[in-house]
Amino acid sequence: MSTNQLDKKSEAWSALFSEPMSELVKRYTASVFFDKRLWLADITGSLAHAEMLAAQNIIAASDLADIQRGMAQIRSEIEAGSFEWKLDLEDVHLNIEARLTQLVGDAGKRLHTGRSRNDQVATDVRLWLRDEIDLISDLLKELQVALVDVAEKNVDVILPGFTHLQVAQPVSFAHHLLAYVEMFARDAERMADVRRRTNRLPLGSAALAGTTYPLDRERVAQTLGMEGVCQNSLDGVSDRDFAIEFTAAASLCMVHISRFSEELILWMSQNFGFVKIADRFTTGSSIMPQKKNPDVPELARGKTGRVVGHLMGLITLMKGQPLAYNKDNQEDKEPLFDTVDTLKDTLRIFCEMVGGQLNPATGQKEGGITVNAQAMEAAANKGYATATDLADYLVKKGLPFRDAHETVAHAVKAATSHNCDLSELPLTVLQGFNASIEKDVYECLSLRGSLNARNTLGGTAPAQVKAQIARHRVRLA
């Protein structure tokens, strides 16, 4: 095949066809303007393949040298922005191969020996996604560190804990933030797990049945730093589980970000007033000059639906495909690419929004989340957050829990009628509900006493929270 032939998309297989592809079909089937981001993975995979072909005496050493020289020039052109991406060449693979053949002649034509675009693209996507997972994992670690930093400064700050969005029990604000650290830690674990299954080599599966050339697939896998080789050629070219798994893990991560966003939005409202975020993460109103809108958390909450939608799209894409490769699989890239971009951008902005921005002059981070401890504690005092503590107190006095629960309900009803907190009821009134109540009851009815009492593993007592912070520091070091 001549260079001119390969430089025309449809001519890559033209001998079989009696008419050229229509311009409409060219545009409809082309992927180059979104899959060109795979260029580095394509070059990396091709160089590993070429090195193996030479080692197996399938191509000459001089061909390998020419391919390496040509790929180096193509890389420079792409990095400089001077590489011409051509619609007629359909995708990233044919664009790079055509340019290589222009540069080095027959050696470029020999590069495709023993492989198909089917196993080539599967390899490229895996290589690209592996590197993106590494970046995402670093961002997840950075976000966890930022949350731990804020938590460490607010161990003794009391926040009303909610169930059903009703005041339930007092918790340490740090304890609340560490709940998100746990979520993002699980996200990081899932990403590591997905990476392991992504990091397997399909190259050498060829179109679907393997190849007649004596390829050393393990050598290519080792060169590319992959953890194994896909063991079935049919599965190797058609498997997109890794993309679905990644998007599922990304969806869960975005759900965690969305839950955190929802709380930030509530906490920032005037009705709560618990926290502020730096002005650079908010916007104003076109008509109401007093407004500071939490656009970043709101948009993150909205983008979560976008990522979850991509997951549903990928699952649906694969559900009816027979083995092996089908053109349907071209549709895996845009949702996968957008999922990666959305998650990375969201994590980056949350790292700064939570942790602040480094001031080069002082070496300290500035901005981030500003906590209104007084507003949080005042809110905790409004909802009879220590009612359970009174029930526990009565149980320790010998009352069965269900009876204690009923007794405290009457006490709360009385406090409500007097428009006061349980801790503000006189001792004589409390003793009217149960004679065993003594003066020490006021310690357990205080917010601080309630917090300190929950000194079990995973509890909200400051001693436990500090232990968890220390654990996370070691884990994230």
Image (tube, rainbow, N blue to C red):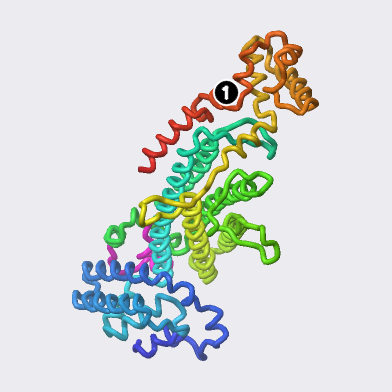
Is the residue 406 above or below the residue 252 in the image? above
Using the rendered view, name the quadrant where residue 73 is placed.
Answer: bottom left
Check if residue 176 falls in the magenta segment: no
In the rendered view of the protein, which quadrant contains the N terminus? bottom left
Q: What residue type is labelled 1?
A: Gly
- Residue at the disc numbered 1: 449
Magenta: main secondary structure: loop
At horizontal 23% and vertical 79% (from top left) the residue drawn is 66
| Rendering coords of residue 213 (x, y %) | 30, 69
Q: How crowded is mark 1: few (under 14 residues within 10 Å), some or many (20 or more)?
A: some
Using the rendered view, name the quadrant where residue 373 is placed.
Answer: top right
Q: Is residue 131 left or right of residue 299?
A: left
At horizontal 61% and vertical 24% (from top left) the residue drawn is 446
Is the residue 413 above or below the residue 185 in the image? above
Given the current orientation, which residue lies at the most extreme right position?
Answer: 417
Q: Is residue 151 left or right of residue 98?
A: right
At horizontal 50% and vertical 67% (from top left) the residue drawn is 333
| Rendering coords of residue 131 (x, y %) | 38, 59
In the rendered view of the protein, which quadrant contains the C terminus? top left
Q: In this view, does 145 lie to the left or right of 175?
A: left
Is the residue 319 above or below the residue 104 in the image? above
Residue 198 showing in the rendered view: no
Q: Is mark 1 on a helix, strand or loop?
A: helix
At horizontal 35% and vertical 68% (from top left) the residue drawn is 211
In the image, the segment drawn in magenta is: 199-216
Check if residue 212 falls in the magenta segment: yes
| Rendering coords of residue 378 (x, y %) | 64, 35
Q: Which is more toward the observer, 47 or 207? A: 47
Is the residue 371 above or below the residue 125 in the image? above
Q: Which is more toward the observer, 246 or 62? A: 246
